[in-house]
């Protein structure tokens, strides 16, 4: 059975814990099971392709908007580029559930969505950012202002800012993960600049004149434009690569469909559980809430974090239900893990589906607060009891649904799946050491 398309339907401290591991040992379906695991995997791959195609399409629009800003800088052009960035986050975030169970995706992901980043590597920063870091010699390298930089004691020519330079030289320069030079968050910083408001209202407020060579603010406007053009071009190229990986002859699709179905089903559940627990509930949410630190906010320059978290949760539900609503309103859907669970334990399927819905509802409450004027970084602020509670409710939902995902693993008799963890959830005292 293949997936099908229907008409539209009516929606700087990082605690790194255990890495997702995946080894599926035993996979047993009841004798009369109707859902073919290979069909589930084919639909999962079709949805991946559709999601990455949508992420690519919106990244192309972002690239075009960035080019328009560079060609004719204005307040309106900057706002259009920012809007295009926000639109691009919606389909991309729904792909993150593919990370942990699919090595091809996980190895690639840091090129497009790595965070947090030491933004002083890229451009000018406020004096409050500081001038040095014991952990990063490139903390304030400011490549936009520096045609030469030093990496690990070696002088490097940075006179031309190209996609190749960003990806091959600057990204994770010196072997330091905080040296994020590419992807959505590098572009976000270039469009918004630093958010200097702490846990108070307001996002980054970079002026459009940072790109206006005739009335340049911030200095080095031509090189800043070079960087923005290179970064958006590179984002498009990286997404093109991942679309191809999920195409008919793509490596990611073939790894699933040509392999043991039990390993493929394990990959789906590994992605769901690891994103739910260690990554989203832990690293992206609980850590920032414990520290009341806006620097631990995922989209920290734009104050768009509530949207990114919400669509991560939607992506997890998509993976279970085997359904995805595309940006054009059509729906790609087909055989699902939910159907497999339902054939064995209908009560568990109802429980897990209900918990996935409950988490999204909690995320929507958090998002509504943000859209009403209380951004995510304000919600995690110290002393904001109501905001903290809204964020904690979403975290609790993610943790709760993970327990039911674990039960689904057991019902499907998939052994030895270890979901990613987080010190912020498993050993919070370590966060403050």
Image: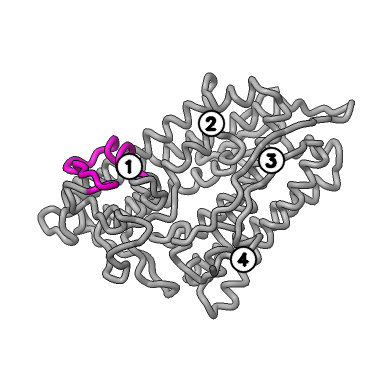
Do the CB atoms of the residues marked 3 and 4 lie less than 8 Å apart? no
Do the CB atoms of the residues marked 4 and 1 lie less than 8 Å apart? no
Other residues around mark 1 within 10 Å, as few (<14) / some (14–19) / many (≥20) = many
What is the distance, in whole Å, between disc 4 and disc 1 at their CAs?
Answer: 37 Å
First of labels 3, 4 by sequence position: 3
Other residues around mark 4 within 10 Å, as few (<14) / some (14–19) / many (≥20) = some
What is the distance, in whole Å, between disc 1 and disc 2 at their CAs?
Answer: 21 Å
What is the distance, in whole Å, between disc 2 and disc 3 at their CAs?
Answer: 18 Å
Give residue 24's position: percent from left, percent from top: 72, 33
Image mark for residue 269: 3
Q: Nearer the viewer, mark 3 or mark 1?
A: 3
Image mark for residue 428: 4
On the question of residue 268 being in view, the answer is: yes
Rendered-image quadrant of the N terminus: top right
What is the distance, in whole Å, between disc 3 and disc 4 at their CAs?
Answer: 26 Å
Q: Nearer the viewer, mark 4 or mark 1?
A: 4
Give yes or no for residue 165 being in the magenta stretch. yes
Which residue is tagged 2? Answer: 49
Q: Secondary structure at mark 1?
A: helix
Residue span colored magenta:
150-172
């Amino acid at each position: 059975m293949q997936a099908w398309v229907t008409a539209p339907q009516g929606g700087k401290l990082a605690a790194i814990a255990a890495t997702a591991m995946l080894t599926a040992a035993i996979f047993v379906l009841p004798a009369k099971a109707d859902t073919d695991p290979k069909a589930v995997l084919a639909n999962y791959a079709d949805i991946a392709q559709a999601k990455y195609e949508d992420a690519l399409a919106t990244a192309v629009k972002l690239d075009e908007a960035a080019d328009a800003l560079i060609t004719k800088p204005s307040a309106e052009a900057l706002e259009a580029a920012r809007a295009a960035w926000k639109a691009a986050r919606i389909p991309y975030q729904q792909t993150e559930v593919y990370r942990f169970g699919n090595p091809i995706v996980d190895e690639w992901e840091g090129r497009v969505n790595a965070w947090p980043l030491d933004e002083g590597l890229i451009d000018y920063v406020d004096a409050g950012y500081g001038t040095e870091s014991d952990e990063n010699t490139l903390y304030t390298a400011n490549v936009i202002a520096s045609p030469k930089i030093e990496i690990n004691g070696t002088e490097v020519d940075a006179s031309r800012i190209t996609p190749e330079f960003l990806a091959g030289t600057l990204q994770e320069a010196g072997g330091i993960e905080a040296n994020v030079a590419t992807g959505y968050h590098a572009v976000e910083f270039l469009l918004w600049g630093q958010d200097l408001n702490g846990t108070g209202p307001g996002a980054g407020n970079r002026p459009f004149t940072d790109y206006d060579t005739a009335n340049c603010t911030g200095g080095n406007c031509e090189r800043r434009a070079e960087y923005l053009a290179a970064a958006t071009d590179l984002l498009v190229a990286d997404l093109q690569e991942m679309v191809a990986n999920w195409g008919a002859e793509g490596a990611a699709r073939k790894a699933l469909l040509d392999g043991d179905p039990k390993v493929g089903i394990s990959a789906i559940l590994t992605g769901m559980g690891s994103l739910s627990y260690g990554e989203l509930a832990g690293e992206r949410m609980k850590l920032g809430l414990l520290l009341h630190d806006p620097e631990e906010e995922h989209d920290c320059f734009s104050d768009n974090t509530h949207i990114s978290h919400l669509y991560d949760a939607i992506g997890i539900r998509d993976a279970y239900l085997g359904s995805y609503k595309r940006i054009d309103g059509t729906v790609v859907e087909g055989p699902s893990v939910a159907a497999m669970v339902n054939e064995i334990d209908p009560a568990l399927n109802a429980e897990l589906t209900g918990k996935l819905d409950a988490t999204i509802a909690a995320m929507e409450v958090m998002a509504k607060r943000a859209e009403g004027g209380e951004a995510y970084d304000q919600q995690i602020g110290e002393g904001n009891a109501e905001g903290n509670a809204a964020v904690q409710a979403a975290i609790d939902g993610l943790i709760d649904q993970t327990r039911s995902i674990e039960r689904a693993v057991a019902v499907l008799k998939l052994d030895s799946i270890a979901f990613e963890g987080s010190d912020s959830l498993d050993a919070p005292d370590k966060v403050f050491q």
